[in-house]
Amino acid sequence: MRKRRINKLLLTGLLLFIITGCSTTKHLPEDELLYIGTPTPKIVGYNEADNGEATLEEVQGALNVAPNNSFFGSPKYRIPFPLGLWVYNRFERYEKGIGKWIFKKLAADPIYVSTVNPDTRTKVASNVLRENGFFQGNVTVQVDTAKNPKKAKLNYTIYTGQRYKLDSVTYVGFSPKEDSLIQATYSKRLLIKEDAFTVNKLDEERNRLVELFRNNGYYFYRPDFITFMADTLIRPGYVNLRVVQKHNIPEEGLRTYYIGKTSINLVGHNGEQPNDSLNFHNFTINYAGKKPGIRYGVLRRRFLYKSGEMYSQQRQNYTQQALSRLGVFKYNDFNYTPRPGRDTLDITVNAMFDLPYDSELELNVTTKSTKQTGPGAKFNLSKKNFKRMGASLNLELKGSYEWQTSSTVDGESSVMNSYELGAALSLNFPRLVLPWIKNRVDPFRFPSETNFKIYAEQVNRARYFKMLSFGGTVSYSFQPKRSIKHTVTPIHLAFNTLQHRTARFDSIANANPVLFHSLDDQFIPSLTYTVTYDNSYRKKKNRVWWENSLTSAGNVTSVIYAAFGQKFSKKEKE
């Protein structure tokens, strides 16, 4: 106790020594001012009808800098005890010993006005205003040293003025073919009359046009081919905008290209280089070994184009995504080579196989309020590219064991042991496996899956019952849109059989028949439909995730019995 008191007294004395012996500006350089914060900027000339709140937030973000001992990073509010600055000023001169240690652990470097650089920040903030249509806007700053000539606050004034809107928007300098593409997608334009002028919208419209052209054969088209000309004098408060294609564009940038030959170089997971090839209709697979590591049809279906088709950036992206979803390649790299003097692109794809197996082991320990505890384990083993089909064969083994930690159970001297064992085997295809889908691709641009699964579980509840469950499922998942996913399980067969039961269980079941029937021998066929909505990919503040499922159990069996002219309820009684 005495030692603790001495330590507390020493610490208190040290803090008092620091507080009384130092100021926060004692060692301040002569040409520097200590920055102590930025009050809320004064806003002048703003009209709420201009809907510029987001712009003002961005402007203030460019101005705000947290001072020393800021309150949770606030540029305005400070904690009244700047311990870090006190330590800095008191112990800066120490080069070794306890003084150096205290400096390294507790000191905070002072933030100077020159470090904040308010003049540069006002220029940046003024540019933010102009880039968002406030062409007359500007930001000024006043360095306030009224309370202390060595300390300064930065008082900013934001003048917005009128926000300019778009008037006419015209597209100039594009070829007749390019102009027809623009007109065909005119409803998707991002520059619309009466909308506020923003540089971000200009960039988004430029990128939209580039994507439009690249999806229609213009492989070499780039964003720097398009510029903008704005006139604010014709109509006060409005911008007459011209979207202009430059004149000095290289010839290949204005040419539409078509797909020629496609060559895929399949490299083994150990780096084995191709030594043989398979060619069919301008589609060549170069592979190592006796046969390709993946079936020709499985690979060909992932390429959403064929020889002679016009180049499309979108189809290239979907193709790369489809290859990645196979889960068998470490990477896939596309290279396009134009044929000299022609409008044809030959494609070379370099793809390296991933390791053929994945495994995962999960261990856990469970403790229950019934004084039961025990370990559990789950082991997963996956075989990628099963039978060269691009499918994944997955084996899951799980088990748990629990024992009674108390030496007696219900007054009886015994140990109650329970266990669960389970195994599941599933085959997952990254596409829809249905007899009527025979095209080269699934009818959906987004991921689709087919899963076949069988499973078995053994449950033993000591002193009560022992039950075996087994079954199987077939399920399909597909996305017609990015935000909507459908999962259909047309076949789910579940079998439960009670292998053993004790007298104690029978006595409980007699008192509660519902419990008995829930564990009785059962065969339950069912089907399930689940729809999921998720718009998180959109850049919106309000994101929505919603899922709803519908399950029907037993009706399938009823239909089967009805087909044979016998009611299912009658069969249950027999």
Image (cartoon, grey):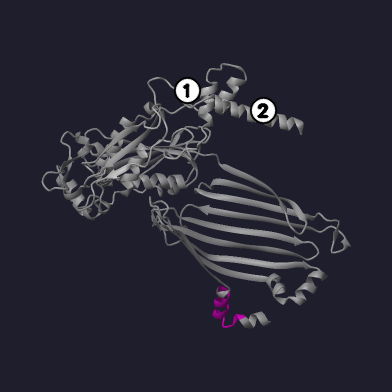
Q: Residues within 10 Å of mark 2 (few under 14, many from 20)?
A: few
Q: Amino acid at mark 2?
A: Leu
Above or below: residue 348 compared with residue 296: above
Task: Residue lying at the far right in this picture: please name it.
Answer: 413
Please state if 319 lies on the left or on the right of 496 as rendered: left
Residue 14, image quadrant: top right
Please state if 493 lies on the left or on the right of 353 as rendered: right
Q: Position of residue 303 (x, y in %)?
A: 38, 47
Residue on which disc 2 sits: 10
- The magenta region covers 556-568
Going from N to C along the chain, the mark reached first, 1 or 2, is 2
Q: Nearest the camera: 547 or 389?
A: 547
| Callout 2: SS | helix
Q: Nearest the camera: 94 or 488?
A: 94
Q: Position of residue 430 (x, y in %)?
A: 48, 52
Q: Position of residue 449 (x, y in %)?
A: 48, 55
| Callout 1: SS | loop
Please state if 227 lies on the left or on the right of 359 as rendered: left
Q: Could you tell me which residue is drawn at 71 percent across and 60 percent down? A: 458
Q: Could you tell me which residue is drawn at 52 percent across and 27 percent down? A: 86
Which SS type dominates the magenta stretch?
helix
Residue on which disc 1 sits: 26
